[in-house]
């Protein structure tokens, strides 16, 4: 998903469901939290992400992860590798 990557590029930790593209972009406990589909669990992790010590750590990690792993250059290199591997 692009939405978590866009949020993390702004230094915003992400709390998302542990499904689909979120699992590819959000690193649980490092750049945000991946949670099961449960209202109480989701609310608990949002609260946890907003606690000052967690927020600062997650925010810093989220921004750094996007800069190092999700640039257009890195995406192009990854896509090229996938295409080359598929053609072999």
Image (spheres, helix red, strand yellow):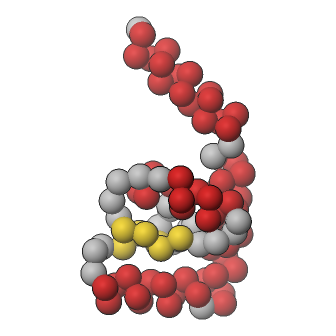
Judged left or right of residue 18, residue 74 is right
Q: What residue is at 64 percent from the left and 82 percent from the top?
A: 55
Total tally of numbered discs in the picture: 0
Q: Position of residue 41 (x, y in %)?
A: 34, 85
Q: Position of residue 28 (x, y in %)?
A: 47, 67
Judged left or right of residue 52, residue 46 is left
Q: What residue is at 56 percent from the left and 22 percent from the top?
A: 80
- Residue farthest along the top direction in this orientation: 88
Q: Quadrant of residue 49?
A: bottom right
Against 70, residue 10 (above or below) is below
Q: What residue is at 69 percent from the left and 80 percent from the top?
A: 56
Q: Position of residue 75 (x, y in %)?
A: 60, 36
Task: Please name whichever residue, 84 or 6, is drawn nearer the observer in this view of the structure.
Answer: 6
Task: Please name whichever residue, 27 or 17, is drawn nearer the observer in this view of the structure.
Answer: 17
* The C terminus sits in image quarter: top left
Judged left or right of residue 11, residue 46 is left
Against 54, residue 31 (above or below) is above
Q: Quadrant of residue 11?
A: bottom right
Against 74, residue 33 (above or below) is below
Q: What residue is at 58 percent from the left and 57 percent from the top?
A: 5
């Amino acid at each position: 998903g692009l939405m978590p990557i866009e949020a993390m590029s702004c230094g915003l930790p992400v709390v998302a469901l542990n499904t689909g593209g979120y699992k590819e972009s959000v690193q649980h406990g490092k750049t945000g939290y991946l949670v099961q589909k449960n209202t109480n669990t989701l609310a608990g992790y949002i609260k946890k992400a907003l606690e000052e010590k967690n927020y600062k750590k997650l925010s810093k990690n989220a921004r750094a992860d996007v800069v190092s792993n999700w640039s257009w250059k890195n995406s192009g290199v990854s896509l090229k590798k996938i295409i080359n591997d598929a053609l072999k």
